């Protein structure tokens, strides 16, 4: 499987890549398949069953809403977040749904969209089953989908997403950190140059750079909107936004800058993104929505506080961070339902640390060291969202992960790249830890803070 930078970083909407973006994409893919095979007009009913983590925390993560608008043809990359609420209200009030926006049928949500809280499909905790029925309740098609983290979906038993498998092999394929470093040494390339060369085998360099800068623009817009908004986040917890007040305190202070103001800025950037994510706003999945604040926060830190920071540094950062994300995606997982939060915040911290070192002109060995440090000190991190919402501890955890990423990068830059624990070893450890972790700590809201903190 040859992953692209633009599969690790994707523009989407909150609050969850695995529980919102993935189900929306799966629902759309299912009805697109019906249309492709001339079955759409024959469909009279659609039944959806959600399993495992999707069933247990799907309401708090907006999975039901994502499925409904996905059946109507919405996709995470292009849907207007402000259009979702009116569409949901129309479907629920009318008891009818417009498949792909063109074929309207009756839809009884309590009977046709079911949360199977005591069952799971065999392959992954985030399982979905879609069934289309025709006249006399004849099954026209039934398909299983899995949302495997970061907005990625798989159908049935397929090994990988079809679009990933269809691409031509890149010039510098790598499956481990050791291979990546060896290729860099053999060809005299830096990590970002190697990743860019791979991307340019699929698209012109001008287009690749433009798409990278578009990702950065979306990240900046998310921070700016997060600083402007106010009030409470959706859901029973009634969490108040903190980023706007932090921003005002930092920009309106008349006191001389303090030695830890930089940390305050990093915190504010991360909170702004993840509060927007929790509100269902537009974010860049990096590599997941639950951890979407870390890469933007560290990039903002780079541009605001590092001398000589520039646009080329942003490109180096994103290409290098994506390379680390590819290693985690291939050799472990970026799904909180599989790995706990070490697979989300831990991976994002590792990616951001590596990206910052690349932006600061560090060596390939220092980059690998920074990525390893970023994950090593997130091993065992659980995913235990209170009330199934991507708010507590998720929002604050992004701020902590961002500061940790900056520190990991600084530790690596103060060394020569030699270290005892390799990135490959820490990725393997993360995978083993995730496999050993109790299911109650893997995005089910059945353990940890989720059962020890009152919901209201």
Image (cartoon, rainbow, N blue to C red):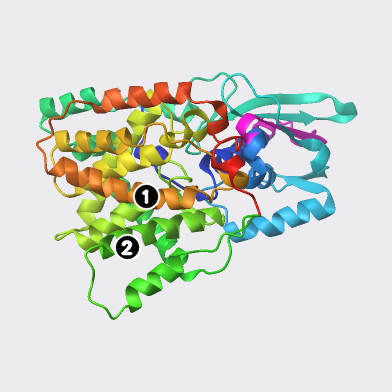
x and y percentages locating residue 126 in the rendered image: 59, 30
x and y percentages locating residue 30 in the rendered image: 65, 33
Q: Residues within 10 Å of mark 2 (few under 14, many from 20)?
A: many
Question: Is 364 placed left or right of 164 in the picture?
Answer: left
- Mark sitting earlier along the chain (1/2): 2
Tell which residue pokes out farthest to the front in this image: 452
Task: Find numbered disc 2 in the image and state the secondary structure of the residue it sits on.
Answer: helix
User: Which image quarter: residue 444?
Assistant: top right
Q: Which mark is residue 400?
A: 1
x and y percentages locating residue 212 in the rendered image: 33, 49
Residue 247 seen in this snapshot: yes
Question: Is 202 placed left or right of 283 in the picture?
Answer: left
Task: Find numbered disc 1 in the image and state the secondary structure of the residue it sits on.
Answer: helix
Find the magenta span and give its range.
33-54
The answer to whether residue 363 is above or below residue 124 is: below
Q: Which residue is mark 2?
A: 265
Q: How many marks?
A: 2
Can residue 270 be found in the magenta stretch?
no
Q: Residues within 10 Å of mark 1 (few under 14, many from 20)?
A: some
């Amino acid at each position: 499987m040859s992953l692209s930078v633009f599969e690790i970083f994707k523009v989407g909407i909150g609050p969850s890549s695995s529980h919102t973006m993935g189900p929306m994409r799966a629902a759309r893919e299912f009805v697109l398949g019906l249309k492709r095979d001339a079955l759409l007009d024959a469909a009279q009913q659609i039944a959806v069953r959600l399993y495992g983590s999707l069933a247990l925390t799907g309401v708090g993560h907006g999975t039901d809403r994502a499925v409904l608008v996905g059946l109507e043809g919405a996709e995470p990359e292009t849907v207007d977040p402000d259009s979702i609420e009116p569409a949901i209200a129309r479907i629920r009030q009318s008891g009818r749904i417009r498949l792909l926006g063109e074929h309207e049928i009756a839809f009884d949500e309590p009977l046709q969209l079911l949360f199977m809280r005591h069952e799971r499909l065999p392959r992954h905790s985030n399982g979905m089953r879609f069934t289309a029925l025709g006249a006399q309740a004849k099954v026209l098609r039934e398909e299983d989908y899995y949302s495997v983290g970061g907005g990625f979906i798989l159908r049935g038993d397929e090994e990988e997403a079809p679009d990933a498998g269809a691409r031509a092999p890149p010039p510098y394929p790598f499956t481990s950190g050791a291979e990546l470093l060896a290729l860099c040494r053999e060809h005299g390339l830096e990590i970002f140059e190697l990743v860019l060369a791979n991307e340019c085998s699929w698209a012109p360099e001008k287009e690749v750079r433009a798409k990278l800068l578009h990702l950065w623009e979306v990240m900046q817009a998310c921070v700016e909107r997060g600083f402007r908004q106010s009030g409470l986040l959706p859901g029973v917890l009634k969490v108040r936004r903190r980023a706007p007040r932090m921003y005002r305190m930092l920009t309106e202070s008349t006191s001389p800058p303090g030695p830890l103001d930089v940390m305050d800025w990093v915190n504010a950037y991360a909170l702004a993104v993840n509060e927007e994510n929790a509100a269902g706003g537009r974010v860049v999945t990096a590599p997941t929505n639950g951890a979407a604040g870390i890469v933007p926060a560290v990039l903002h830190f780079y541009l605001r506080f590092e001398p000589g920071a520039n646009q080329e540094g942003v490109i180096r950062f994103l290409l290098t961070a994506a390379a680390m994300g590819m290693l985690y995606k291939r050799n472990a997982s970026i799904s909180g339902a599989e790995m706990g939060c070490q697979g989300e915040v831990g991976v994002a911290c590792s990616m951001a640390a590596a990206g910052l070192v690349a932006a600061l002109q560090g060596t390939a060995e220092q980059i690998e060291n920074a990525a390893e440090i970023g994950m090593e000190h997130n091993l065992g991190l659980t995913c235990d969202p209170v009330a199934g919402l991507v708010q507590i501890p998720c929002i604050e955890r992004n701020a902590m992960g961002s500061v940790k990423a900056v520190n990991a990068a600084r530790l690596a830059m103060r060394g020569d790249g030699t270290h005892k624990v390799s990135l490959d070893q820490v990725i393997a450890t993360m995978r083993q830890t995730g496999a050993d972790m109790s299911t109650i700590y893997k995005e089910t809201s059945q353990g940890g803070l989720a059962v020890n903190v009152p919901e209201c």
